[in-house]
Amino acid sequence: MERTFSTSRTDSWWVETLVSASVFVLAIIYSIVRALEGKFFQWGPYLSPLYPFPIETAWISPAMFTMWVPAGFRITCYFCRRVYYRSVFADPPACMVREPKRNYKGESAFPYILLNLHRYFLFFAILFVPIHWFHAIKSFIWEGSFGMGLGSILILADSVFLTLYVLSCHSFRHLSGGRIDNYSQNNARYKIWKFVSSLNKNHGFFFWVSLISVIVADLYIRLLSSGTINEIRIF
Amino acid sequence: MKNGEVTFLVFRGEREKGIFKEYKIPYQEGMVVLDGILYIQSKLDGDMAVRWNCKAAKCGSCAAEINGKPSLMCKTKVKDLEQPIKVEPMRAYPHIKDLVSDTSWNMKTRRNMIQKIGFSPKKDANWRMKDQDIEKGREFRACIECGLCLDTCHVLREHKLFEKFIGPAYLTFAAYLETHPMDSANRLKWLKEEGGIMYCNITKCCTEACPEEIHITDNAIIPLKERVADEFFDPIRMIARKIFGGKS
């Protein structure tokens, strides 16, 4: 009987698994801690992307009202599933590498069957995109006039990457025209589907950069807001 | 290449009793793994079992595991590999001898699919199709059924669910049928219940293995999963179908 993680592969297959697991788990821990913290999410014209609705409440962090949307969208995302099945559940740890013995049911049984609800999280994620853009534009308005700081760039980058991540989603691709077989009779849908398909090729890349950009933007605003660092004002 | 020699470690014998045997053979410019294996067979070990045919990466017969990765022997260049080059049969399948596995399950699965969910043309179908109508199918038709995606798929390789899951190659075939503009059949129930599409957990090993570079996961499996979700896992659509009837 071959042991778990045994393989004939001669390359460093574990590097991708280890790096993905580390970034993914750290991002989850950071997001939960920040969502529970409930403060240091606003500074000047900047608002943390983890707090798109800064409603003041004494009993619960405002991030908790909205956190379920990005969390649900990412957890059910087809690319994200690949990441955690491989890196966190070792199911499999990498291609052609032995995995721990288990009663495998894939996504045919509870709880993984619920991942099919990705399309609903997509609808909410689409609603969040203009809100992120609203805050990105606001971050360039300093006391009524146009200005730019490092935070403006980070919030703008987060909005761009989030938009690309949502638009390249597999469910959005399906919605845009994936269920059509007769494109010659649906030219407009064909063009939209082609555009979404071209973005979809880089969905994995957009997943990672949008995950990292939201954390970087939030961290920067947290450090500004708590007085740990000073703003780098460009003009 | 040490002294113009290449070292091969080739699996010889039958699964439980088999061992890796070392061979040193002369290197030639442009050599692929299959060249080395055929050299061993013709000059050193005439009884070595190996399956091959076209030597042009189009028949899929020489599929094997090279340094632990699913590859076609005729397409894998020796100079790109770490030495010794370890060559073994596709391990997801029952083993026959040396580098030959029993891949008859592939043919059985395909035959079963043709019988149960085969192509069913629309009445009065217009067979003069436009380019955009066959765009999806063109990619799926490139499949040479080498079995490498099936070999690397952990649902088959690790969990041995051959009876419940048709595997990436045949999901690609199903995607070809399902997206065909002239087809009228609905295979979604079959794919969910007999094809076992929900067993796939989209780890994309099949896409990485495909020598024809078909984006199996993104272009075949996920779009099929989305169609299955439309039909069986989307409560709003299901309610809409109940109220308005037909497809929603």
Image (cartoon, coloured by chain):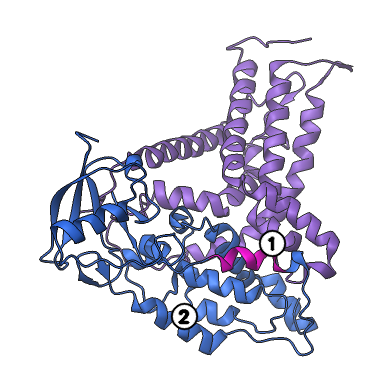
Chain colours: A purple, B blue
Residue at screen point 86% across, 17% down: A146
In this rendered view, identify the residue nearer to me: B35 or A146: B35
Q: Chain of mark 1?
A: A
Residue A19: x percent and y percent? 41, 36
Residue at screen point 47% across, 68% down: B169
Residue A111: x percent and y percent? 47, 63
Q: Would residue A7 be counted in the magenta stretch? A: no
| Residue B60 as seen in the image, left or right of residue A142 | left
Residue B34: x percent and y percent? 31, 56
The residue wearing badge 1 is A174
In space, the residues marked 1 and 2 are separated at their CA atoms by: 26 Å
| Residue B215 as seen in the image, left or right of residue B109 | right
Does any portion of residue A105 appear in the rendered image?
yes
Quarter of the rendering occupied by the C terminus of chain B: bottom right
Q: Would residue B140 be counted in the magenta stretch? A: yes
Q: What amino acid is labelled 1 in the image?
A: His
Which residues lie in the magenta part? B134-142
The residue wearing badge 2 is B110
